[in-house]
């Protein structure tokens, strides 16, 4: 069975794009990915498109105006893991021998008029009374701080790190590095989460080109092996949302480590699901980078810095880029591709050989979350 490789990646700027729709953003990301791979676009055997709010036949509408028609185009919606799911579908088709060259696209426009905080579950009684995502993660943060005697300063350390990383990322033109005092003194959104502990609302798109062994051997540009691709869904919980640990993230990571033949200690660089500072701290533990209750210290000691034990969110993460839902999973894999092929510029993680991408989300009454994707890339 063939291995699967990432052969190219493209990304738009992440932020507010008032004069561009999601289709235009998607086309920019796709062209950049195709040019990055140095491949004839007519060689695409299949395209997958992850999004949440962009309407029917989104992928066809992106690709049609580019002259890329006739191939199977598979549109994917899986909440915050939609981009990760798009990659998983393309990966599976190459593994199954149904395609040699696949495009995985993710895009979303969230800043259009009428937007606002997304509820955890639209039909849920608590959500209808105000349990939007900042308040849900604030409750998680309160529970974590009390359970492990963690501090707001440890939460702020995540935002300080990610904002500094973002200033090294040319795809975040609005990036600014924050001090701990600026993070702690910014307006309170939902205690203990201040504004700079929450991701901004943004638009964006990212795309990657996946190829089989045969095609990878023909290309002259750098590739990275996509060594594991895992998708799961949440199990029933008492709270219906992520608690101070994410069982589905732990399960997906364990499956991905097994599939790739590695352990958590082998990971050099990670793009994790960090729309709120508390989420990154919890996912340090979920992904096995430290033990239960140790995430706050991990953040405060900067063990997730670019030159730390494992570089977490060197792109700036969702906290800096924002979280255009369908684009998140593909953007994470694009960043890892650049890191493992030494194309990450000033934010390059020294000696990065193995990377992990993790996306999680989707409110469903009574279960932890709708979907989780974990992908592992290895340097070729």
Image (cartoon, helix red, strand yellow):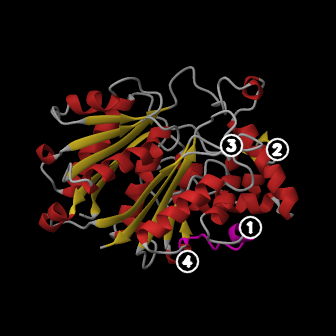
Instruction: State whether the magenta stretch is mostly helix, strand or loop.
Output: loop
The location of residue 267, given as percent across then percent down, is 50, 73
Callout 4: SS: helix
Q: Quadrant of residue 74?
A: top left
Q: Nearer the viewer, mark 2 or mark 4?
A: 4
Q: Nearer the viewer, mark 3 or mark 2?
A: 3
Residue at 38% over, 31% down: 22
The location of residue 310, given as percent across then percent down, is 55, 73
Q: Residue under circle 3?
A: 236
Which dot marks residue 265? Answer: 4
Q: From what the image shows, is residue 202 above or below residue 123? A: below
Q: Residue under circle 1?
A: 292
Q: Quadrant of residue 190?
A: top right
Is residue 309 on the magenta stretch? yes
Q: CA distance from mark 2 to mark 4?
A: 33 Å
Comes first in the chain, label 2 or label 1: 2
Q: Nearer the viewer, mark 3 or mark 1?
A: 3
Residue at 53% over, 21% down: 113
Q: Residue under circle 2?
A: 191
Q: Nearer the viewer, mark 2 or mark 1?
A: 1
Can the viewer see residue 186? no
Comes first in the chain, label 3 or label 4: 3
Callout 1: SS: loop
Q: Quadrant of residue 137?
A: top right
Q: From what the image shows, is residue 90 above or below residue 121? A: below
| Nearest to the observer: residue 140 or residue 172 | 140
Query: Does the residue at mark 2 contact the one at mark 1 (Cβ under 8 Å)?
Result: no
| Nearest to the observer: residue 210 or residue 61 | 210
């Amino acid at each position: 069975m063939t291995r699967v490789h990432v052969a190219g990646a493209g990304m738009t700027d992440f932020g507010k794009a008032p004069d561009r729709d999601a289709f235009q953003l998607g086309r920019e990301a796709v062209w950049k990915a195709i040019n990055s791979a140095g491949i004839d676009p007519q060689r695409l055997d299949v395209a997958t498109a992850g999004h949440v709010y962009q309407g029917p036949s989104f992928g066809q509408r992106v690709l049609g105006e580019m002259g890329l028609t006739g191939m199977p185009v598979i549109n994917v919606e899986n909440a915050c893991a939609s981009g990760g799911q798009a990659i998983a579908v393309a990966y599976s088709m190459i593994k199954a021998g149904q395609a040699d060259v696949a495009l995985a696209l993710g895009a979303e426009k969230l800043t259009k008029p009428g937007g606002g905080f997304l509820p955890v579950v639209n039909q849920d009684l608590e959500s209808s009374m105000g349990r939007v995502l900042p308040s849900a993660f604030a409750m998680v943060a309160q529970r974590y701080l009390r359970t492990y005697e963690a501090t707001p300063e440890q939460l702020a350390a995540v935002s300080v790190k990610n904002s500094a990383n973002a200033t090294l990322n040319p795809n975040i033109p609005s990036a600014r590095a924050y001090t701990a005092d600026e993070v702690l003194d910014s307006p309170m959104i939902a205690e203990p989460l201040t504004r700079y502990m929450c991701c901004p609302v943004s638009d964006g798109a990212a795309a990657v080109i996946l190829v089989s062994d045969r095609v990878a051997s023909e290309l002259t540009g750098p590739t990275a092996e996509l060594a594991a691709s895992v998708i799961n869904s949440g199990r029933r919980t008492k709270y219906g949302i992520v608690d101070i640990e994410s069982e589905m993230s732990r399960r997906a990571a364990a499956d991905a480590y097994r599939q790739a033949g590695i352990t958590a200690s082998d990971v050099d660089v990670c793009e994790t699901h960090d729309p709120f500072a508390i989420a990154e701290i919890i996912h340090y533990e979920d992904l096995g980078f430290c033990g239960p209750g140790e995430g706050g210290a991990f953040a405060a000691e900067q063990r997730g810095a670019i030159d730390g034990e494992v570089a977490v969110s060197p792109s700036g993460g969702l906290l800096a880029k924002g979280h255009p839902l369908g684009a998140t999973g593909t953007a994470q894999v694009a960043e890892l591709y650049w890191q493992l092929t030494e194309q990450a510029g000033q934010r390059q993680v020294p000696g990065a050989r193995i990377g992990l991408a993790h996306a999680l989300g989707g409110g469903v009454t009574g279960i932890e979350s709708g979907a989780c994707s974990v992908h592992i890339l290895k340097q070729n």
